Amino acid sequence: MVTENTEINVEEGQYYALSELNFCGDIGHAILRVPKTKSKTWKEEEELPRLVMLSARTEESVAPIFDKVRFFVQTQCFHF
């Protein structure tokens, strides 16, 4: 269990793995890579690609959630 912030040495091109487990039993994993070059500064009016990850036991379970995400993106109500 992590109880305080832990400093890490971030190296260019290095991979880091993160895992999460909460009291509801949800589990999440991510693998992150430090970019080899600095990215340009993002301006709010620029269009950025989005990655949406959904998880369920069946395709039928994911479909209504994906429909909601699609609606929010199309109506531009989906802000990060």
Image: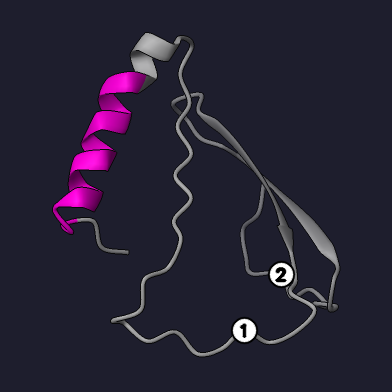
Q: Residue 60 carries which label?
A: none
Q: What secondary structure is the stretch in magenta mostly built from?
A: helix
**Residue 6, labelled with which disc?**
2
Element on which disc 1 rests: loop
* Quadrant showing the C terminus: bottom left
Q: Which residue is pictured at 71% across the width and 69% down the height?
A: 6
Give whichever of discs 1 and 2 has the lower sequence position.
2
Q: Is residue 24 left or right of residue 10?
A: left
* Residue under pointer 1: 39
Q: Which residue is drawn at 26% across and 22% down?
A: 64
Dividing the picture into quadrants, the one containing residue 20 is: top right
The verdict on residue 76 being magenta is yes
SS class of the residue under badge 2? loop
For the magenta stretch, what is the residue range? Answer: 63-77
For residue 45, above or below residue 13: below
Three-letter code for the amino acid on which mark 2 is drawn:
Thr
Q: Where is residue 26 in the image (x, y as percent from the top left)?
A: 50, 28
List x then y, in percent, for residue 75: 13, 53
Check the image and report above or below for 38 versus 56: below
Task: Measuring from the top left, give residue 62's x and y in whole percent.
Answer: 37, 21
Q: Please tell me how crowded label 2 is: few (under 14), some (14-19), or many (20+) other residues with Cα within 10 Å.
A: few
Residue at left offset 75%, top offset 84% = 37
The answer to whether the residues at label 1 and label 2 have Cβ atoms under 8 Å apart is no
Q: Residues within 10 Å of mark 1 (few under 14, many from 20)?
A: few
Identified by mark 1, the residue type is: Ser
Tell me where residue 4 appears, x and y as whole percent.
Answer: 62, 65
